[in-house]
């Protein structure tokens, strides 16, 4: 398949091929490739293979992260009664998606997806056609106030009622200079009591090299990768109360089956915390 034949480049996806920049690898498309998807380009695959050479466990990590997301959403909807979800940095749709999991348990659950990539936005818009109680909008995590005020978010989410905020594998693309703690604080402050924060984050804690060579691959991408230590990731939860088992490697957060053979190498923390 050539670049111009790619499904995201078709007019059916709502974005002309000439508007798609394939000159740099994109984290969402690289993530899609790591998951075994086909919504990526040669530039993404080349960068992904460079990353895999430096961090061979990456495919185990991203699949474990995806499974963590699924388990967290299931628990929050089935056990905690959550009926509203704000998913920021949703990425390219990968089945089952958040709304499919949540609405499979409680059909009335409302889900607002946000991503800063127009390609992801266009592709998700096609995929979500006909999905009730869902919306997709362009928004950048670096401007949390704009996300909170976006009409698509306001039309979907009632901030007077508990919300599950998903920041899954997204904060490590925010540099310290961009104030990730302040960004998350703005979002946390907008949530009413009884809301939850689901967060996962890349780390170098489990590898002697800190996976600095792997992270360097993203210097040529549209966003840099910034792995952080557990103590720093903990700070993003603020005064929210972490649910058991706390902030842990994602495969070990309430596993519902055998752990991956190399789960101890997974360089991703995950946790779920409650407000109030």
Image (cartoon, helix red, strand yellow):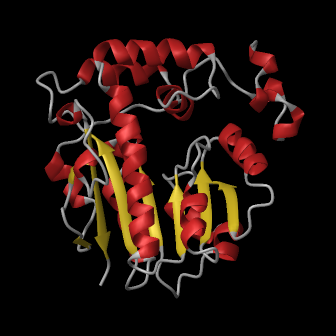
Q: Does 182 appear above or below 11?
A: below
Question: How many numbered marks does the figure carry?
Answer: 0
- Image coordinates of residue 64 in percent, x first then y, are 35, 41
Residue 194 appears in the picture as rendered: yes
| Residue 259 position by quadrant | top left
Residue drawn where x is 64% and y is 69% of the image: 153
143 left or right of 1 in image: left
| Residue 241 position by quadrant | bottom left
63 left or right of 147 in image: left
Residue that extends furthest to the front in the rendered view of this protein: 257
Residue sitting nearer the eye, 102 or 123: 102
Residue sitting nearer the eye, 120 or 222: 120
Q: Quadrant of the N terminus?
A: top right
Q: Does 219 appear above or below 27?
A: above
Residue that extends furthest to the right in the rendered view of this protein: 11
- Image coordinates of residue 155 in percent, x first then y, are 70, 75
Residue drawn where x is 60% and y is 61% of the image: 99
Residue drawn where x is 57% and y is 75% of the image: 106
| Residue 237 position by quadrant | bottom left
Q: Does 66 appear above or below 212?
A: below
- Image coordinates of residue 76 in percent, x first then y, are 41, 71
247 left or right of 179 in image: left
- Image coordinates of residue 195 in percent, x first then y, are 40, 78
Q: Quadrant of the C terminus?
A: bottom left
181 left or right of 11 in image: left
Residue 188 appears in the picture as rendered: no
Residue drawn where x is 11% and y is 24% of the image: 208
């Amino acid at each position: 398949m050539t670049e111009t034949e790619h499904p995201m480049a078709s007019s059916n996806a709502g974005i002309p091929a000439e508007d798609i920049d394939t000159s740099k690898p994109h984290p969402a498309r690289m993530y899609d490739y790591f998951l075994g998807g086909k919504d990526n380009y040669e530039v993404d695959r080349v960068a992904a293979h460079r990353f895999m050479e430096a961090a061979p466990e990456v495919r185990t990590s991203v699949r474990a992260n995806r499974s963590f997301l699924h388990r967290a959403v299931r628990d929050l909807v089935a056990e905690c009664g959550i009926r509203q979800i704000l998913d920021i940095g949703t990425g390219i749709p990968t089945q089952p998606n958040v709304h499919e999991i949540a609405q499979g348990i409680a059909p009335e659950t409302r889900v607002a997806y946000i991503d800063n990539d127009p390609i992801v936005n266009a592709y998700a818009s096609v995929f979500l056609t006909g999905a009730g109680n869902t919306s997709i909008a362009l928004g950048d995590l670096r401007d949390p106030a704009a996300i909170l005020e976006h009409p698509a978010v306001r039309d979907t989410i009632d901030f007077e009622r508990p919300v599950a905020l998903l920041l899954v594998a997204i904060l490590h693309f925010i540099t310290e200079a961009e104030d990730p703690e302040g960004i998350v604080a703005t979002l946390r402050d907008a949530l009413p009591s009884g809301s939850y924060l689901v967060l996962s984050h890349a780390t170098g804690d489990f590898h002697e090299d800190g996976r600095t060579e792997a992270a360097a691959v993203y210097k040529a991408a549209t966003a840099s990768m910034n792995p952080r230590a557990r103590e720093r990731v903990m700070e993003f939860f603020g005064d929210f109360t972490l649910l058991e088992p706390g902030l842990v490697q994602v495969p070990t957060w309430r596993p519902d089956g055998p752990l991956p053979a190399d789960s101890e190498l997974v360089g991703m923390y995950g946790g779920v915390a409650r407000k109030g």
